[in-house]
Structure formats: C-alpha cells, structure tokens
C-alpha cells in the first residue's frame, strides 16, 4: 500500500491506541530496519544512529531484531491473521 512511507501511515493509525513509546517505534522502525539491508542497496545501514540516545531507541532496535527482521524470511513460521485478531481487537477497543 505504501512501501516508501508505511511507517508514517502505520504510526498515524495506531497513535490513539498505543503508548507514546510504541508510537515512536512504529514511526521510526523503517530507519531501524534499514540496518539489516540498506548497505546491500548502497544506503547507510547505520542511519538509525541519528536516534542513538533517544529514550525509545532500544525498544525500536529490539522490535526490529526480534520481529520486523524475521518477517522478511519466507520460511519463518507465521500464524494466520485470525491468530492476531483477539489482540488487535483488544488494542483498538481500549483507545480514546
């Protein structure tokens, strides 16, 4: 849907329903995910270092390492969307 700006779109969608740290993580995860592949495309894999010292840097780095990075592995076992529906409903029903 939005390969060039999906972090901004996703962050806008979840903003009202997640704590500020998770919103920041979603908004910036694209730069942090670049650590794993931008150098293969001629980019700067260390672009995330611009945010080093930010209170949510480690949260975002950990999210990308544990969850976002493995999402690119076609052999990674992924449950169907229905597996996540209860969690998604819970998060979006608790917002303001």
Image (spheres, rainbow, N blue to C red):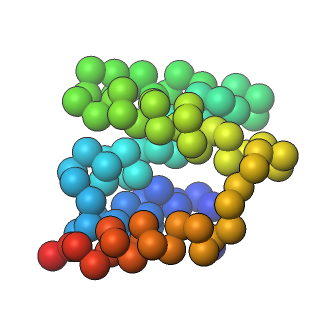
Quadrant where the C terminus is found in the figure:
bottom left
Q: How many marks?
A: 0
Residue 12 visible in this rendered orientation of the protein: no
Q: Is residue 57 above or below residue 30?
A: above
* Among the 4 quarters of the image, the one containing residue 44: top right
Q: Is residue 62 left or right of residue 42?
A: left
Q: Is residue 7 above or below residue 31?
A: below
* Among the 4 quarters of the image, the one containing residue 12: bottom left
**For the point 27% across and 59% down, which residue is it?**
18
Q: Is residue 35 left or right of residue 56?
A: right
**For the point 26% across and 67% down, which residue is it?**
17
Spot the residue most to the left: 96
Q: Nearer the viewer, residue 5 or 66?
A: 66
Residue 73: x and y, percent? 78, 43
Quadrant where the N terminus is found in the figure:
bottom right
Q: Is residue 67 left or right of residue 8?
A: right
Residue 9: x and y, percent? 44, 67
């Amino acid at each position: 849907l939005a390969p060039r700006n999906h972090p901004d779109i996703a962050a806008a969608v979840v903003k009202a329903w997640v704590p500020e740290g998770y919103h920041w993580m979603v908004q910036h995860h694209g730069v942090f995910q670049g650590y794993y592949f931008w150098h293969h495309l001629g980019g700067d894999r260390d672009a995330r270092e611009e945010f080093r010292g930010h209170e949510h840097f480690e949260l975002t780095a950990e999210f990308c390492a544990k969850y976002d990075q493995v999402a690119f592995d076609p052999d990674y076992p992924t449950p169907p969307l229905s597996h996540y529906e209860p969690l998604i409903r819970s998060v979006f029903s608790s917002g303001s």
